[in-house]
């Protein structure tokens, strides 16, 4: 399996990279900063230097699966939300189709289930996530749209709860467990699903296998 990991140096992307390495799943890390090359080579990855604001289509050469793990930071504002959470996802899907990619995985957000009911401060972010999710789903590619709830940097528990309603208060989910969901879903060949999840008590493999 040849995987392109977009957003590899982000908070969640870095954890996805570690779990791909631990699972002996070859991948290419797309990086903006060349100074991070060596740290990803230690994880067994090949690397490509590219920027989401430019033409990054060459990064897709030879890949079969794409994981889009990039995301705007909480303080970056609406322009970065538009760029990273919507426009770059749409560009990635278009590149994927041109390169014959088999499966496209995007890490979205539970708020994207109903942007209009999101807290006002997060409504634009949620709407950008929803628009990119819809584009992925309609692309004709095999897809996985993963929608975790509130994220933390705590150590992973290895357990989640599958959810669909963004309004009910949920237990936050760790970024470690989000990364594990990504890798486990790929291992079992889960495709053409939109999966909302939060912290919970179900072992990740069992929760995904039940889908």
Image (cartoon, rainbow, N blue to C red):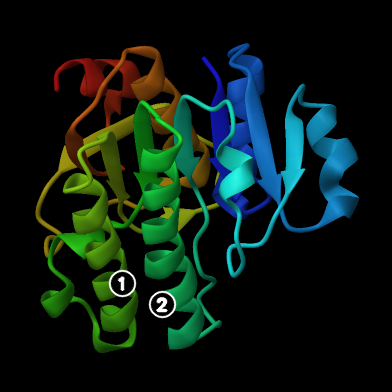
Q: Residue at x 77, y 26 (%)?
A: 43
Q: In screen coordinates, is 83 left or right of 94?
A: right
Q: Is residue 209 left or right of residue 74?
A: left
Q: Position of residue 128 (x, y in %)?
A: 31, 72
**Cα separation between marks 2 and 1:** 6 Å
Instruction: Classify 10 Å Cα crowding around label 2: few (below 14), some (14-19), many (20 and above).
Output: many
Q: Which image quarter is the C terminus in? A: top left
Describe the element under mark 1 as helix, strand or loop: helix
Q: Position of residue 99 (x, y in %)?
A: 46, 35
Q: Residues within 10 Å of mark 1 (few under 14, many from 20)?
A: many
Whether residue 83 is situated above or below residue 57 in the rendered picture: below
Name which quarter of the figure residue 202 lies in: top left
Quadrant for residue 26, please give it.
top right
In the rendered structure, which disc, 2 or 1, sits on the residue that comes first in sequence?
A: 2
Q: In the rendering, at what x and y percent does residue 94 appear?
A: 38, 51
Where is residue 208 shown, x and y percent of the image? 24, 23
User: In the rendered view, does 102 fall on the left or right side of 62?
Assistant: left
Is there any visible trace of residue 24 in the rendered image? Answer: yes
Which labelled disc corresponds to residue 128? 1
Q: Are marks 2 and 1 in contact (CB under 8 Å)?
A: yes
What residue lies at 50% left-to-right and 45% top-to-bottom?
Answer: 175
Determine which residue is flagged by label 2.
82
- Work out whether residue 20 or residue 82 is closer to the camera in this orientation and state it: 82
Q: Could you say whether the residue bearing mark 2 is in a helix, strand or loop? A: helix
Please identify the residue farthest to the front as the structure is shown.
Answer: 98
> Does the image show residue 169?
no
Residue 5: give its label.
none
């Amino acid at each position: 399996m040849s995987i392109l990991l977009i957003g590899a140096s982000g908070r969640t992307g870095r954890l996805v990279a570690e779990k791909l390495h631990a699972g002996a799943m070859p991948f290419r890390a797309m990086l903006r900063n060349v100074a991070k090359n060596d740290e990803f080579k230690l994880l067994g990855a090949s690397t490509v230097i590219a920027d989401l604001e430019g033409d990054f289509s060459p990064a897709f050469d030879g890949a079969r699966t794409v994981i889009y793990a990039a995301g705007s930071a909480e303080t970056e504002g609406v322009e970065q939300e538009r760029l990273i959470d919507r426009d770059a996802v749409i560009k990635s899907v278009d590149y994927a189709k041109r390169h014959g990619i088999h499966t496209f995985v995007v890490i979205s957000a539970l708020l994207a289930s109903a942007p209009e009911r999101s807290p006002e401060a997060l409504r634009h972010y949620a709407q950008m996530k929803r628009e990119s999710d819809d584009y992925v789903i309609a692309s004709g590619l095999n897809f996985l749209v993963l929608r975790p709830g509130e994220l933390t940097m705590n150590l992973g528990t290895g357990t989640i709860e599958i959810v669909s309603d963004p309004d009910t208060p949920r237990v936050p989910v760790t970024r470690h467990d989000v990364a594990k969901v990504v890798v486990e879903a790929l291992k079992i060949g889960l495709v053409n699903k939109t999966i909302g999840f939060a912290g919970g008590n179900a072992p990740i493999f069992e929760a995904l296998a039940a889908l």
